[in-house]
Structures are given as structure tokens and as C-alpha cells.
């Protein structure tokens, strides 16, 4: 299981972004090529493991987008994208996002108080993005039922668990300047 994800992860090239060793992978970058068998495998794994008793799937620009779109067509659950662009619609919520290599603002629209949501993203690393997403959703009055992230590196999961939320991740990796090492996979215990 997850053969395509493991294979592509092992071969992911590394580039430096400041002091940050950034891996490049189809799921996290859309580069060099997203093969349908990889996306299908990842989406099937999310469908199998996530709590889908929700009103909306919430994803983040940019690389949450293919995941949210594919998951929505599989489950018939609508999805929203937290954008890096301001729309100034009534009720728009702005939060600050910091990753290991960038900073910016995120803008949430389309959530009503009491909406049950599943958050899906491609990577969790420092947890800075997920923290901002949770803060925006809490401010909007959403009920966060589950959080699923495809690729885990670093300490971000702990940051979010310390906020009181469970985070499921599909593959856990370590990254240094030489490459990616796989530490574990959601299907290891099966
Ligand atoms: O846990 P963190 O340190 O916050 O890192 C994780 C975030 O970093 C990437 O987003 P980025 O803002 O780079 O956007 P992208 O999807 O356009 O690559 C990724 O898509 C996650 O959202
Ligand atoms: O190393 C990374 N690669 C791709 N996306 C990311 N988002 C956070 N860290 C990374």
C-alpha cells in the first residue's frame, strides 16, 4: 500500500530556502508531474482514515487544492480554499501564516457558525500554517472534526496536538540536505 507515495518520496530532490531544506514532491509542489495513480492512492487513504461526517472540507492555497478537489468529487462533500488573496467579502477572516521559509496572510470565507469541517493539507512542518487555519476556523465558529495531512516533517503535529486537536498524517519523513528518509507510514501497523 502507498507504494507510489513511498517511491516518489524517497526520490524527492532537496533545495535550500534560506536555512530550510525544502523537499520537492508532486503532492506538495505539483512538480515535476502529478501521476494519477499517486493522487488516487493518497485520496483513497484519506477517504479510508478521515472522519467524513462533516459539512465542508477545508483546504489551503495552493497545494491543498488538488487534494480538496479530488476528495470532494469522491465524497460529495463541498470544499473551501483558504486563500492568500483578500476578497473583502462580509465576514472574511484574516490570519497570519508563518512557515519555515515564508510569511503571509490567509483569508477565510464561506464558513458558517456550527459548520463541521475536515481540514486537509499537503504538508505539516512547523505547524505554522495549520495553527493559522485553526485560529481562522475557531474564529468563524466551525467545529473541527478531523485534520488529515499527507506529509509530516518536523514538530508541527505536536504544536497542533498541544492546541487540543488530533492530526492524522499519511507519511512521516525526515529531511536533510542529502534527501528524504521515511520514518513511518499510516499503513505500517496494518
Ligand atoms: O507547517 P508549516 O511550516 O506551516 O508548513 C506547511 C505548509 O507549507 C506549505 O504551504 P506554502 O504556504 O508554502 O504554500 P504552497 O501550498 O503554495 O506550497 C504547505 O502547503 C503547508 O500548507
Ligand atoms: O519541504 C517542504 N516541501 C514542500 N512543501 C513544504 N511545506 C513545508 N515544508 C515543505
Image (tube, helix red, strand yellow):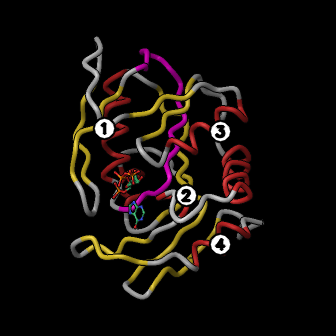
The residues tagged by marks 2 and 1 sit, at their Cα atoms, a distance apart of 19 Å
Vertical comparison of 167 with 181: above or below: above
Q: Are marks 4 and 3 in contact (CB under 8 Å)?
A: no
**Mark nearer the viewer, 1 or 4:** 1
Specify the farthest residue to the front: 32
Q: Quadrant of the C terminus?
A: bottom right
Give 188 or 24, whichever is nearer the viewer. 24
Residue placed under numbered mark 2 in the picture: 27
The residues tagged by marks 1 and 3 sit, at their Cα atoms, a distance apart of 21 Å
Q: Is disc 4's CB within 8 Å of ligand 2?
A: no
**Where is residue 143 shown, x and y percent of the image?**
47, 27
Vertical comparison of 52 with 165: above or below: above
Q: Earlier in the sequence, mark 4 or mark 3?
A: 4
Residue placed under numbered mark 1 in the picture: 84
Q: Are marks 3 and 2 in contact (CB under 8 Å)?
A: no
Give 3 or 172, whichever is nearer the viewer. 3
The residue at 66%/33% (across/down) is 52
The residue at 42%/88% (across/down) is 178
Element assignment for label 4? helix
Q: Is disc 1's CB within 8 Å of ligand 1?
A: yes
Q: Earlier in the sequence, mark 1 or mark 4?
A: 4
Residue placed under numbered mark 3 in the picture: 71
The residues tagged by marks 1 and 4 sit, at their Cα atoms, a distance apart of 30 Å
The residues tagged by marks 4 and 3 sit, at their Cα atoms, a distance apart of 20 Å
Quadrant of the image occupied by residue 187 = bottom right
Answer whether residue 159 is magenta in the image: no
Element assignment for label 2? helix
Element assignment for label 3? helix
Q: Which residues are magenta?
A: 110-125
Task: Tell me the tag on residue 6.
Answer: 4
Amino acid at each position: 500500500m502507498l507504494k507510489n507515495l513511498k517511491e516518489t518520496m524517497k526520490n524527492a530532490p532537496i533545495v535550500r530556502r534560506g536555512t530550510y531544506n525544502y523537499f520537492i514532491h508532486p503532492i506538495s509542489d505539483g512538480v515535476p508531474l502529478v501521476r494519477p495513480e499517486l493522487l488516487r492512492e493518497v485520496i483513497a487513504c484519506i477517504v479510508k482514515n478521515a472522519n467524513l461526517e462533516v459539512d465542508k472540507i477545508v483546504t489551503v492555497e495552493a497545494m491543498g487544492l488538488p487534494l480538496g478537489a479530488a476528495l470532494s468529487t469522491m465524497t460529495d462533500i463541498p470544499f473551501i480554499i483558504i486563500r492568500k488573496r483578500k476578497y473583502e467579502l462580509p465576514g472574511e477572516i484574516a490570519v497570519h501564516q508563518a512557515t519555515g521559509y515564508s510569511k503571509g496572510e490567509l483569508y477565510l470565507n464561506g464558513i458558517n457558525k456550527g459548520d463541521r469541517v475536515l481540514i486537509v493539507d499537503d504538508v505539516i512542518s512547523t505547524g505554522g500554517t495549520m495553527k493559522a487555519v485553526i485560529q481562522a476556523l475557531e474564529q468563524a465558529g466551525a467545529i473541527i472534526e478531523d485534520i488529515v495531512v499527507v506529509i509530516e516533517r518536523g514538530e508541527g503535529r505536536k504544536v497542533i496536538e498541544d492546541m487540543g486537536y488530533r492530526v492524522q498524517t499519511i507519511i512521516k519523513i525526515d529531511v536533510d540536505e542529502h534527501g528524504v528518509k521515511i520514518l513511518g507510514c499510516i499503513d505500517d501497523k496494518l
